[in-house]
Amino acid sequence: MSLQHLSQVPAFTERVVAEGLALSRRPLQTLQVNIGKRCNQACRHCHVESSPIRTENMTFATIERLLTLLAYAPSITTVDITGGAPELNPNFRHFVSQIRAMERTVIDRCNLTVLFERGQQDTADFLAHHKVQITASLPCYTTGNVDKQRGSGVFDKSIAALLMLNELGYGQPDSGLVLNLVYNPLGAFLPGAQAGLQADYKRVLKERHGIVFNSLFTITNMPIKRFLDDLLRQGQLDAYMGLLAERFNPSAAEGVMCRDLVSIGWDGTIYDCDFNQMLELPASGRRRTIWDIGALSELQSDPIALDNHCYGCTAGAGSSCGGSLA
């Protein structure tokens, strides 16, 4: 059921019109691909509802089709690979190596602990060899908060993974190996200022663990899937949606990622963003797959599918897969 029917805030589409905004597409720059929902973790806030028991995985044929489309889409300079834990897809390395052969930037959204899973012992070396940018989840720099959200022992494993990545050159000056971290709040509130949190993370992780990294991205908890379930159980949905709507920021809305990004599901279905994908809200409101189009450029003129969860990307400093927007 749509958030528009669950909460009391005005429809997001009406708010956009009232603010005089036209959220049309810009030239596509990023292809975001969810290559599977299997994960070695089952985090409380996960909007994908990933877990070790999920079996959805992008097939080799689907990946080959994406590579063909990407080869004829010169405006797309970045491929953002997500999951689940994307590294657990058996076709992950083939996908990455072929994209890098096209000289496109690859981002791997890594949960860090997957690097210690069976069969993943050389994954960090593979990522470094192909100069894959790593965007790693670390919702806090304290043991208790991370383990509460992500599971017992996750913090210590995450620290060990970050140290291993640092040894390979990730996050080190002039290495060309980019390591970014992701913070998301532990409850029904907006993240603090990204610059301030980044400074805190850099200081604490360096002082306590000797860890360095490039940037910190703050991402608002989206009121969908597991986090929505938590809000409903705790009777906090209306309050949280009210907060997001109250803090609506037109400047953030202008920069939402769906304007220059297209998201592809594990089965090849086309979406405007990763959040719409998890809500099964297809691009243009009609289901199409990558086999139904001849080129990614065909999506350029499509309207963007919006709903009330979009308040999450436009509240405060805004939120995207690359952090705050304003």
Image: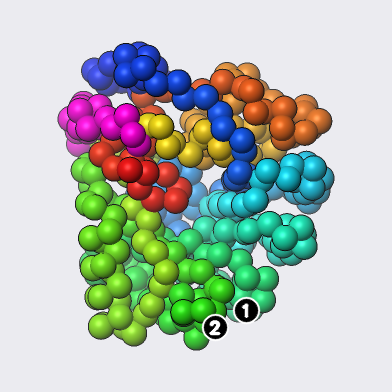
Q: Which residues lie in the magenta part?
A: 232-252
The residue at the point 63 percent across, 19 percent down is: 286
Q: Is residue 239 magenta?
A: yes
Q: Is residue 50 magenta?
A: no
Q: Residue at x 46, y 75 (%)?
A: 171
For the N terminus, which image quadrant? top left
Q: Is residue 264 left or right of residue 85?
A: right
Q: For residue 300, which quarter of the picture?
A: top right
Nearer the observer, 183 or 116: 183
Amino acid type of the residue that numbered disc 1 sits on in the rendered structure: Asp
Q: Mark 2 belongs to which amino acid?
A: Leu
Mark 1 to mark 2 CA distance (whole Å): 7 Å
Type of secondary structure dominating the magenta stretch: helix
Residue 251 position within the rendered picture, expressed as x and y whole percent measured from the top left: 33, 34
Q: Are marks 1 and 2 in contact (CB under 8 Å)?
A: yes
Q: Secondary structure at mark 1?
A: helix
Q: Nearer the viewer, mark 1 or mark 2?
A: 2
Q: Decide if residue 90 is in sight here.
A: no
How is this picture coloured?
rainbow
In the picture of the structure, the residue carrying the numbered disc 1 is: 125
Q: Which residue is mark 2?
A: 168
Left or right of 242 on screen, residue 318: right
| Residue 184 % position (x, y) | 32, 52
Residue 64 against residue 17 in the figure, above or below: below
Residue 62 drawn at (x, y percent): 76, 44
| Front residue of this view, candidates 315 and 1 | 315
